[in-house]
Image (cartoon, rainbow, N blue to C red):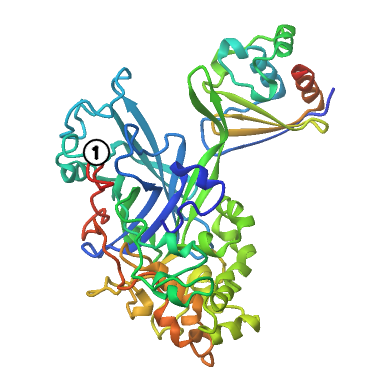
Amino acid sequence: MSSHREAPEISKDPVADSTDLYAFVSPDKTSTVTIIANYIPLQLPSGGPNFYEFGDDVLYAIHIDNNGDGRADISYEFRFTTTVRDGETFLYNTGPISSLGDTSWNRFQTYDVSMVSGGSSTVLGSGLPCPPCNIGPLSTPDYGSLAAQAVASVGGITVFAGQRAEAFYVDLGSIFDLGNLRPLANAHAFGSLSAGPGVNATNNFNVNSIAIQVPISAVTRSGHPVIGVWTTASRQKARIFDSGAGEYVSAGPWEQVSRLGNPLVNEVLIGMGDKDRWNALPPHDDKEFLTYVTQPGLAGLLNVLYPGAFPNLAAAVTAGTARADLEAIFLTGIPAGVVNKTYTTFTGTVLADMLRLNTSVPPAGSPSILGILGGDVAGFPNGRRPGDDVVTIELQALAGATLSLVDPTYKVDAVVKSVTDFKPDPPSIGSPPTGSFPYLGTPYSGYNEPS
Amino acid sequence: MPRHDEERRSSGSSGRRLSRRSLLQGAATAGAAGLAVTAMGAANPALAATDRSSAVSLDPAKTPAGPIVVHVRDAKSGDIEVLSGTSETRLRDKDLAARIVRAIG
């Protein structure tokens, strides 16, 4: 949900709305990288009878740049097909679904996955099954088995597409109420609220995930372990409603309607008037959005919302300091020698919002949810794992935590370490991420949620 | 002859090269072939009159299976885009644009 409903146009098109992107060296299979692209935000688990499904008319893609030009060298593309067995019943299923081929499952999806590289497209797998949504104990009594059946190995990759539990946590209700952070609410300028622990607004919701696990050797160039990753959703240029059939039909070339690389970039950094266009452009055009990154509006707001709490940050903002630290984190990767001699996510000088992953860094034995701010070089912004607290990391970075990395004279405000939307952090998650592919937790059951 | 420039781009392999003539052929058989010519207003009586005026036959083997969507971007300059399959064909045809404008009345 780090990009859920982040722009006006895509907020009206949830099927194509990318919500989160993860990329990490697989902790249980370290010769591979796992990439997860989530779509369809804030799924109420009980939302039937037409439960959540990918769009048959949407082209979903995961892109990988391995030479630093902000252009895809390898793309994995996904197209979905929905089948209805019996059009005369209103039911999603007419009995318990015990397997993916169960005929009591009335409305199901399959998909094709292709790899596009070097100007050619190769079909890796066709007719691959998605699992059903997690309906409830009578309809999907052994959901774990159904999900496991939907993990496929095709064309040298492992792939899964279907519903999973939301892993991202954020206090949406507080943050979008004038930038309030509940643990610091008593210090907010616009009220007299009491401090609180934070409310995980995305808990007990589901998402639709597209997950791939790919050999590192298949997506990197020799001697260049850092890759840039982003996901897109595209629709055909024209979409018209066929009243005779009661459905939409599409025509024309694919046009990108959603994009996601680093979490929260379009949601928090890009201005309202540019959000839709940002979603339609490729990463290598991101230089035109540079000012949004180097002069972020939220950094200027912090000392207003919390008067006097960020004096050094306020001085830097007033001085017009261009945030080279944020430019590195989001647009170029962090060069070696900034964090330490060896840490790098640098891909080159091309400004492009990509989630960069140094695949030569092994998974952490004891991961820190604060990633690099917690001393964990295997976490965000070196890729992103499902448990990483990207909200706190980015809030603290915007508040100046990383400015001292590029300006040794800058003194980070003492309060920055307290900037978070949860205390304690992380909050409780009903169905947390797992240790194996596809890593996100079992989706919440419609029978149990909302409870 | 009206000026007729054509530019085509495609994001897939299912597209078919269109010309002004084939577009008119498609429009002429819109009802029979199930074509959606949105910019021409398929349900408009004026369009029906236009349909009857065409005597050009259509090769079924060259007819796209899906809808054809015509977008007149600028009638004055004749800037028209034709969308079919995953292809887009850009036409510059003032005469065709004028006929479409007359058809929608």
Locate residue A356 relative to residue B18 in the image: left or right.
Answer: left
- In this rendering, position of residue A345 left or right of residue A129: right
Q: Can residue A27 be seen in this view?
A: yes
Q: Which residue is drawn at 77% across and 25% down?
A: B97
User: Eyeballing the image, is A226 above or below A260?
Assistant: below
Residue under circle 1?
A135
Observer-nearest of A186 and A229: A186
- Whether residue B89 is situated above or below residue A358 in the rendered picture: above
Q: Is mark 1 on a helix, strand or loop?
A: loop
Is residue A381 among what the camera can see? no
- Binning the other alpha carbons within 10 Å of mark 1 as few (below 14), some (14 to 19) or many (20 upward) gives many
Q: In which quarter of the image is residue A291?
A: bottom right
Classify residue B99 as left or right of residue A445: right
Identify the subunit bearing mark 1: A
| Front-most of residues A353 and A179 | A179
| Residue A365 placement (x, y as % from top left) | 22, 74
Residue B63 is situated, as x and y percent measured from the top left of the image, at: 57, 18
Q: Which residue is drawn at 55% across and 79% down?
A: A303
Image quadrant occupied by the N terminus of chain A:
bottom left
Q: Residue flagged by tag 1: what amino acid is it?
A: Ile
Q: Which of A338 and A90 is in front in this view?
A: A90
